[in-house]
Amino acid sequence: MSEVSIVCGLGNPEPHYRSNRHNLGFMALDTLSERHSLSWRRVAGPAEVALWRVAGRAVTLVKPLTWMNESGAALAKQGGAANDALLVVCDDLNLPLGALRLRPRGGSGGHKGLDSLIEHLGAADFPRLRLGIGSAPPGIDWVEFVLSDFLPEERDAVNDLVTRAADAIETAVRAGLDVAMRRFNAPGEAADGGAGSP
């Protein structure tokens, strides 16, 4: 497996989406960039990128600004890493709030941002770090739910989640995906997700 050289966090641009459940990918990258005092700049795509020099090499952090459903178009313009050198960070309705799951490959699980990445990359064999937001409450449409802000009583769990997500990204970059999966996935979970894994 290649070393991680691009980390792509998924979310929606514009300030009023900043605290949405759908923006956990952006939040995790922001936490990591603040930890290492990285600077973001806007590039063609459009996207925001930050260059992180770590373990003797350069790793590019990417936040697509094309809206969630077109994330793949922005990432494709950032060029050239092998799929297994890409790590994608996104929210997940299928995981409880606060849970995270790191996998070397898998399906989209219905996530429109992942659908776009799979379409533009032509394959689903890229690692992804899924961050749990929990399922929509009864009577609430899932689209409305993912575009809602976290509740005040959820903030501590969210802050802990994005901190652990930044830790998992850093471990994957410094020590490799296998080490990060063993360290951060829940005990008993298989490390390798198949092509249809959510």
Image: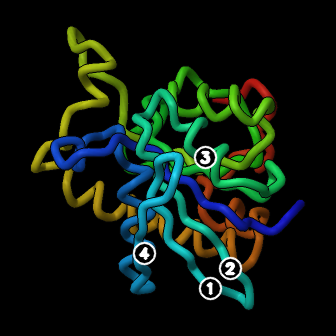
Disc 3 to disc 2, C-alpha distance: 17 Å
Vertical comparison of 144 with 8: above or below = above
Q: Secondary structure at mark 4?
A: helix
* Residue linked to disc 1: 53
Which amino acid is tagged 3?
Answer: Leu
Seen at 41% across and 45% down, the residue is 65
So how many labels did they put on this image? 4
Do the residues bearing badges 3 and 4 touch, measured as CB atoms within 8 Å?
no
* Residue linked to disc 3: 75
Answer with mark 3 or mark 4, whichever residue precedes in sequence.
4
Q: Secondary structure at mark 1?
A: strand
User: What is the number of the mark on residue 92?
Assistant: none
* Residue linked to disc 2: 58
Q: Secondary structure at mark 3?
A: helix
Q: Which quadrant holds the N terminus?
A: bottom right
Disc 1 to disc 3, C-alpha distance: 20 Å
Seen at 61% across and 46% down, the residue is 75
* Residue linked to disc 4: 33
Which amino acid is tagged 2?
Answer: Ala
Seen at 50% across and 52% down, the residue is 9
Crowding at label 3, few (<14), some or many (≥20) Cα neighbours within 10 Å?
A: many
Let me know if residue 131 appears in the view: no
Disc 3 to disc 4, C-alpha distance: 18 Å
Write down the quadrant of residue 34 in the picture: bottom left
In this view, the mark in front (3 or 4):
3
Q: Secondary structure at mark 2?
A: strand
Q: Which quadrant holds the C terminus?
A: top right
